[in-house]
Structure formats: C-alpha cells, structure tokens
Image (cartoon, rainbow, N blue to C red):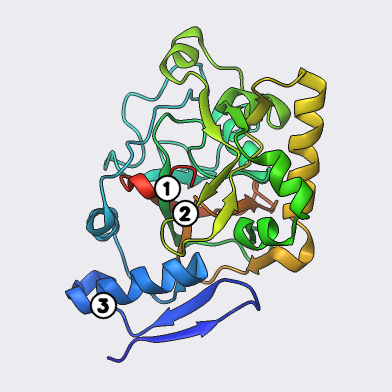
C-alpha cells in the first residue's frame, strides 16, 4: 500500500494511512513514519490491530523503551499479577488486574486522573521520553478525547524578549507534584525514592524538525534560581499560553487508532468520561530519547 499523510491541523498533527503495523513494516515505511513525526509531531495511524507484543515491537524500532512502574492498587500495594504482562506496555485504562472497572477508592484511579492535566510524558524522569504510542483497544461511547498542543508553535509565537528571558532556565519536574494537583494519589516513601525529581531546560531544540520548543508540563514545579512564587507564576503563564486553542489539536478516538506523539515538542491531556460505568482500555509504549541533539540548542 502507498503511504499517505493528511494534515489534521494547520500547525501540526497528521493522519498516516497505508501502514499495517501488525504485519510488520519495511525500512521505507519506518522512515516515512519518522519523517511524518519530525514534521507533524502527532501522527494518527487508524485501524491498527495490535496486541501488546506487536505494539512493543513496533515502538522498539525507534529506540529503547521505558518500563512501566508499579502503581498502588486498591489495598495499597501493587497487584501481584498486573493486568498487562509486557513490562514495556503501560496500562492507561480504568480497569483493575482482573479486568473490572476500578473502584472509586482505588489508588490507580487517583493516579491516572492526573493525566487530565496538561503534561508531557516522563518529563519527571532523568532520561527524556521521545515518542509515546497510545493504542485504543476499548473506547467509551462518548468523551475521553485527547488534546495535544504544539510547543514549537507556541515558542515561535512568544515575543523576542520572552524568548531571551527563557534561555538557560531549568525547571524541576516531579510526578508527585502533578499527582498532588489532581487525583490525590499518595506515594509511598519507596515510590518517592524510586522516582526523584528531574531537572530539564525550559527551552530545547527539537531534534526532528530543528525548531525550538518549550519543555513544560504539569509535572514542572519550580525554576532554578527563581523565588518559588515567581517560578510557579512563569510556568503557569507559559502553560496557559502554549495551550491556547490555536495551538491545540483534539483527537476523538476510534477503535484501533494508534496515536504517536513527540514528547519533546508537544503537551497533551486526557479528558473525562463516565469512567465508573464505561470501559476505556488504552495501552502505551514510550521510546526513550537517545539523541543528543534533543538537549538545549
């Protein structure tokens, strides 16, 4: 089949058809997907019939994969047998280890609610995430859209004086900062030690396009060298600016969609749905960035 790329937004995001990932792809298709990602930053591949192994194998074509961390279950400890066995596939659902809808008091529900804040995956890790790949296995009848924002376009739209102000600034990112904002997930001391804060430049050059991009998120808690209040205010101002409607693409999920996004130059957030009555089963693989060019340029 011929690869076709169709833009979905004036600034970024595109749909790519003509690739059957479950059947395996050749080098030219692999390169076509990478080229589309370099330009559009968010790429939708519809009608993909993937299991966990095939999703992880496809993701691994683009680099090493993150390992999904354990999350506390209903009774405090991580389930002995997780619902998803492949360690490189993250469970982005409202289901427990038995496939039942999570109880309202289950800590996994609280943890995942934080995904409704604007964020970029794994900015709280020491190693940057390059691409995330989210596959729709079961979708609810309504709601649960995902919003994406292009932080390259947002950076381009900043005034020159603001751009100059941001150069060299470093922000601290913590998963526990964002989880305290929404959801109320309480980490154990072991979790806190296993996932300490990370420190990343506020502005970086995106390696795929060569464009400068903001690197901000709900995980960002403060800016080094600034008073706490002043740093928080700047982060909030940048996040509000970058998520204006003109920079945002809204994806309405269809069964079988695989959406890939570049965490180095986008933000995203989940939106609510009737999670106590409808199932949403999404699975994510995330590629670790090993390209040195992703650092501040």
Q: Is residue 160 above or below residue 81?
A: below
Front one among 137 and 39: 39
Which disc number belongs to residue 29? 3
Quarter occupied by residue 169? top right
Residue visible at 60% across and 59% down in the picture: 152
User: Which residue carries the number 2 mark?
Assistant: 282
Single out the mark in the foreground, 1 or 3: 1
Residue 294: assigned label: 1
Q: Residues within 10 Å of mark 1 (few under 14, many from 20)?
A: some
Query: How far apart are the two marked residues, 1 and 2, measured between alpha carbons?
Result: 28 Å
Q: Is mark 1 in CB contact (under 8 Å) with mark 2?
A: no
Q: Which structural element holds mark 3? A: helix
Mark 1 secondary-structure assignment: helix
Q: Position of residue 92 (x, y in %)?
A: 49, 46
In this rendering, position of residue 8 left or right of residue 58: right
Percent position (x, y) of residue 43? 47, 70
- Give whichever of 195, 52 is nearer the camera: 195
- Dot placed on the residue nearer the N-terminal end, 2 or 3: 3
Give neighbour class at mark 2: few <14, some 14-19, many 20+ (Cα, 10 Å). Answer: many
- Residues at circles 1 and 3 in contact by the CB criterion of under 8 Å: no
Q: Is residue 81 left or right of residue 47?
A: left
Residue 277 appears in view: yes
Against 190, residue 147 (above or below) is: below
Closer mark to the observer between disc 2 and disc 3: 3
Q: Nearer the viewer, residue 284 or 126?
A: 126
Mark nearer the viewer, 1 or 2: 1
| Disc assigned to residue 25 | none
User: In the figure, 48 relative to 204: above or below?
Assistant: below
């Amino acid at each position: 089949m011929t690869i076709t790329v169709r833009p979905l937004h004036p600034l970024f995001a595109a749909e790519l058809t003509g690739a059957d990932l479950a059947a395996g792809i050749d080098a030219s298709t692999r390169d076509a997907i990478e080229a589309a990602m370099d330009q559009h930053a968010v790429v939708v591949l519809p009608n993909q019939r993937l299991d966990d192994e095939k999703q992880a194998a496809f993701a691994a074509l683009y680099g090493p994969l993150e390992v999904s961390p354990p999350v506390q279950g209903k009774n405090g400890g991580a389930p002995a047998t997780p619902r998803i066995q492949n360690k490189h596939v993250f469970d982005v659902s409202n289901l427990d280890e038995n496939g039942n809808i999570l109880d309202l008091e289950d800590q996994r529900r609280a943890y995942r609610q934080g995904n409704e804040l604007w964020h970029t995956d794994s900015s709280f890790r020491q190693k940057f995430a390059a691409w995330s790949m989210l596959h729709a296995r079961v979708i609810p009848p309504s709601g649960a859209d995902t919003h994406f924002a292009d932080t390259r376009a947002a950076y381009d739209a900043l005034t020159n004086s603001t751009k100059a102000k941001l150069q060299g600034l470093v922000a601290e990112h913590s998963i526990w900062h964002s989880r305290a904002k929404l959801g109320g997930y309480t980490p154990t001391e072991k979790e806190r030690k296993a996932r300490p804060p990370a420190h990343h430049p506020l502005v970086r050059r995106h390696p795929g396009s060569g464009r400068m991009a903001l690197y901000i998120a709900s995980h960002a808690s403060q800016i080094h060298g600034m008073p706490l209040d002043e740093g928080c205010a700047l982060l909030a101002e940048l996040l509000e600016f970058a998520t204006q409607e003109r920079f945002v693409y809204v994806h309405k999920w269809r069964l079988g969609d695989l959406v890939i996004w570049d965490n180095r130059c986008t933000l995203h957030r989940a939106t609510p749905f009737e999670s106590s009555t409808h199932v949403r089963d999404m699975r994510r693989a995330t590629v670790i960035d090993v390209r040195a060019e992703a650092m501040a340029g």
